[in-house]
Amino acid sequence: MKTLITLLFSLALSSFLFAQDSEKAQISNLIDNWHNAASKADQKAYFDFIAEDGIYIGTDETEIWTKQQFFEWSKPYFDKGKAWSFTAISRNIYLSEDRVLAWFDELLYSGRTKLRGSGVLQKGDDGWKLKHYVLSLPVPNDKFKEVVDIIKKEQNKKIEVEE
């Protein structure tokens, strides 16, 4: 009897883990398609994946956009037929217990350098939608002070202009 219970538990756990892996694979594919839409300058597909109340945070301190603001900012790039191209090098995906929320982090290649992305997705009646995305530029630890000094100089220039 103990063996039967152990076997049933193992089967249930395996089934749960397989379903979770399958869901993560689906999410990863959706994120890849999202990045691919930008590289193909398919603005409709790109923005259809972002939730109506979604937020996109870019690498510049001023880039905290609603979906509509990001759409308007990016429109000239998409209209020219050349937006941006990010390819995932690695990605970690995590799911809430009820499998309605997912969050992820990814290392990307932009064609020139590596970037870091992280986001939150929510599953609704129309599938998974991106609620929040942050794009960042990883800075090597041994270059951090140098980069901070460069940013500080730029910020000081802006302060002088404003005064």
Image: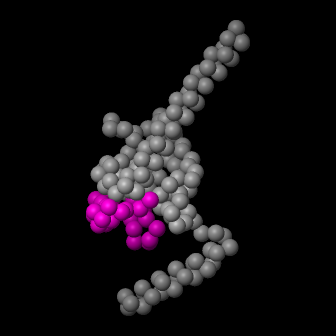
Q: Quadrant of residue 129?
A: top left
Looking at the picture, how far across and down is residue 20, in whole percent?
A: 53, 33
Question: Would residue 146 be counted in the magenta stretch?
Answer: no
Q: Is residue 5 above or below residue 59?
A: above
69 left or right of 64 in image: left
Instruction: Give the side of residue 159 with respect to residue 67, left or right.
Output: right
Who's the residue at 44% across and 59% down the image? 85
Residue at left offset 60%, top offset 69%: 139
Between 75 and 50, the residue placed more toward the observer is 75
Q: Quadrant of the C terminus?
A: bottom left
Specify whether residue 131 is in view.
no
28 sits left or right of 144 in the view: left
Specify start and end residues of the magenta stretch as a single range.
Answer: 56-85
Q: Position of residue 69 (x, y in %)?
A: 30, 63
Residues 122 and 92: in front is 92
Q: Is residue 33 left or right of residue 66?
A: right
Figure quadrant of residue 73: bottom left
Q: Position of residue 91 (x, y in %)?
A: 56, 49
Residue found 51% across the figure and 38% down from its top: 25
Q: What residue appears at the point 67 percent right and 11 percent down from the top-left corner?
A: 4
Which quadrant of the view contains residue 80? Answer: bottom left
What quarter of the picture does the N terminus occupy?
A: top right
Above or below, comparing residue 6 to residue 1 in the picture: below
